[in-house]
Amino acid sequence: MEAKLCSNSKCLKKGLLQDISNFHKKRLGYDARCKICVNERKKLSRLKDKKKIYKEFDIRLSMPSEERFVEVLATLIE
Ligand SMILES: [Zn+2]
């Protein structure tokens, strides 16, 4: 059984050897971060995207009408 350390300094299992099955397999070897950390990171980046969208609306719209809302949304999606 192979074991590996997660490279993330904030990992829940920091400093603990984890089973290799806790790491995503890559073309060359395994991911440096364990699956838990990779998932956590994905979650965070999704949240950041949402925050960014809200910020855009704050800046561009003080009283968003439905038309304007769709308009701005379209520019964000592009
Ligand atoms: Zn980790």
Image: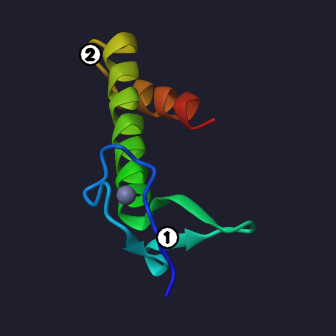
**Residue positioned 43% across, 63% down in the render:** 34
Residue position marked by numbered label 2 in the rendering: 63
**Residue positioned 31% across, 63% down in the render:** 16
Determine the secondary structure under disc 1.
strand
Q: Residues within 10 Å of mark 1 (few under 14, many from 20)?
A: many
Disc 2 CB within 8 Å of nearest ligand 1 atom: no
The reply, left or right, for residue 20 in relation to residue 59 is right
Q: Position of residue 48 (x, y in %)?
A: 37, 35
Which disc, if any, is residue 71? none
Q: How many marks?
A: 2
Tell me if residue 13 comes above or below residue 11 in the rendering: below
Counting residues from the start of the chain, the first of labels 2 and 1 encountered is: 1
Q: Nearer the viewer, residue 47 or 19?
A: 19
Determine the secondary structure under disc 2.
loop
**Residue positioned 30% across, 54% down in the render:** 14
Tell me if residue 46 comes above or below residue 17 in the rendering: above
Q: Nearer the viewer, residue 15 or 42?
A: 15
Identify which amino acid the numbered label 1 is placed on: Phe
**Residue positioned 31% across, 52% down in the render:** 11
The quadrant of the picture showing ligand 1 is bottom left
Mark pair 2, 1: CA separation = 47 Å
Task: Check whether the beta carbons of the residues at disc 2 and disc 1 lie within 8 A of each other.
Answer: no
Residue position marked by numbered label 1 in the rendering: 23
Disc 1 CB within 8 Å of nearest ligand 1 atom: no
Tell me if residue 8 comes above or below residue 17 in the rendering: above
Q: Residues within 10 Å of mark 2 (few under 14, many from 20)?
A: few
**The C terminus lies in quadrant:** top right
Identify which amino acid the numbered label 2 is placed on: Met
The reply, left or right, for residue 77 in relation to residue 61 is right
Q: Position of residue 29 (x, y in %)?
A: 68, 68
Q: Position of residue 30 (x, y in %)?
A: 61, 67
